[in-house]
Amino acid sequence: MAPLEPWEKVLVSENFLISSHGSVSCISCHGGEQSPDKETAHTGLVTHPSDDAAAYCATCHADVVNSSQESLHSTLSGYKVSMYSRSIPENHPALDEAFGNHCSSCHTSCGDCHISQPDSVGGGFLSGHEFVETPPMTRTCTACHGSRVGNEYLGKNSEEIPGDVHFRIARMNCVSCHTGSALHASSVDTGNTRYTASQEPSCRGCHAEIGAAGDTVAQHSIHQDKVQCQVCHSIEYSSCDNCHVEISSKTGNPFYTTDAHYLGFYIGRNPIQSEERPYEYVTVRHIPIAPDSYSFYGEDLLPNFDLVATWAYATPHNIQRVTPQNQSCDACHGNSDLFLTVDKVKPEELDANKDVIVESIPE
Amino acid sequence: MRRSIFIPMMITLCILAACSPASVPVDDKEAEGQPASSATGVVISESSTVDQCVECHTDKSKLIDTAKPEEVVVKESEGTG
């Protein structure tokens, strides 16, 4: 889609005005004052009513609002859990400050999925202010989830790396797998990170026949839950090294620097093995963290850096039926290039990744 | 403050909506020319006077005249986010 013109972003359509939501006056949601003068009309404007969904949406959508308020999109608790797990309570205030400056802008309001494009891509109505039931993939989801998931799914990482089979062949989009109720769900009971809960969605949820009696693919019956599906069905994906955050002395704006961004495919041992994710071997990617990521906010803020792997459990979104590594048994068995061996890990991160590093390649 | 107008208004809307014939979608205009809000029986005060917000936000040329030029954001971040 061509970028929206500034006026287009805020042009309200007739369809909105005749819809349930549009039959309420603008002022009852946005504040402001009746005036033909823009500045006056905008005094006390509430630009993002759905940041306070309890006030503006809950009267009619109580269930969605109640659970959504505790969803990862709303709380971003995944970030906090990840910061805190490498730190100590004394450092939480400094880390909270960093979070406030650099992460909280990713907070996702109802409006970011249903009404407007996220601010990070300049905002603008999805459709003349209508409350759109199904969030459009490239204008909402991948506006935020672009650099990893979006590029993988749509095949934008490189000419040689095709997009996900579910996109190319099955013409599915994000919400075909990530349902509204899952995205609205509270994460409080599930550990507040994306991989602590049950697998949602799960590959087997749709492909129940895999590994079951009658499956003719030998690789399925042999490996079952020892090997995560993506180990055989995904291809090169991106990893990032270090993300260093600071406040600019020139402009006062927050900014970040990432050291390296590279494509690769790495099979590691499962750092978060559990009943829900019983696999011995999984795909892993380097996440943008380093001991000095938050050094702008204080010294040694991540003293427990080695407690959590920097090569993290990954579910790359570029599934293919046939991949270089699943073409034969030997394409994978004994092929050390595919595995996260000690030589691929930075010396200063060996401790953090001791549970992930593969010592002996499966023969 | 704003909530104090909004919530009672919404509650009234909901209550009225509940009285209206089962799930008549508001945007299903019963007859051409009827105000859309009549399905819920809500009389929105602005229908008699002009709602200045609607006036401007449905008028392309007014929006073009008043829209702030897009700010050129200095990109200070480096690498992939």
Image (cartoon, rainbow, N blue to C red):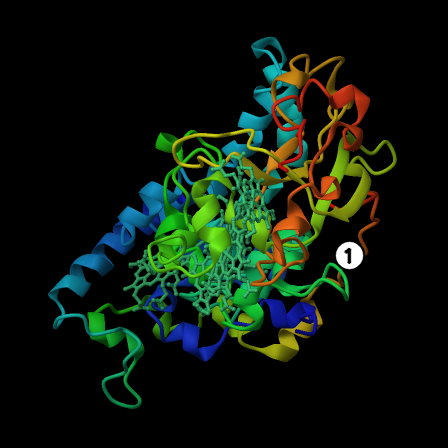
Q: Is residue A35 left or right of residue B37?
A: right
Q: Could you say which is closer to the camera, residue A127 or residue B9?
A: A127
Q: Residue B61 appears in which quarter of the rendering?
A: bottom right
Secondary structure found at label 1: loop
Q: Amino acid at mark 1?
A: Glu
Q: Residue A243 appears in which quarter of the rendering?
A: top right
Chain of the residue under the numbered disc 1 shown in the image: B
User: Is residue B79 in sight in this rendering?
Assistant: yes
Q: Is residue A206 left or right of residue A363?
A: left
Across and down, in percent, residue B23 comes to 18, 70
Residue drawn at x 35%, y 72% is A19
Residue drawn at x 29%, y 52% is A61
Across and down, in percent, residue A39 comes to 62, 57
Query: Where does the N terminus of chain A fall, quadrant-wise?
Result: bottom right
Query: Where does the C terminus of chain A fall, quadrant-wise?
Result: top right
Q: Which residue is mark 1?
A: B71
Q: State the residue lying farthest toward the right.
A: A250
Residue drawn at x 79%, y 44% is A261
User: Is residue A32 in sight in this rendering?
Assistant: no
Residue drawn at x 43%, y 61% is A216
Q: Residue A160 appears in which quarter of the rendering?
A: bottom right
Q: Is residue B64 left or right of residue A319?
A: right
Q: Could you say which is closer to the camera, residue A309 or residue A129?
A: A309
Across and down, in percent, residue B58 comes to 53, 76
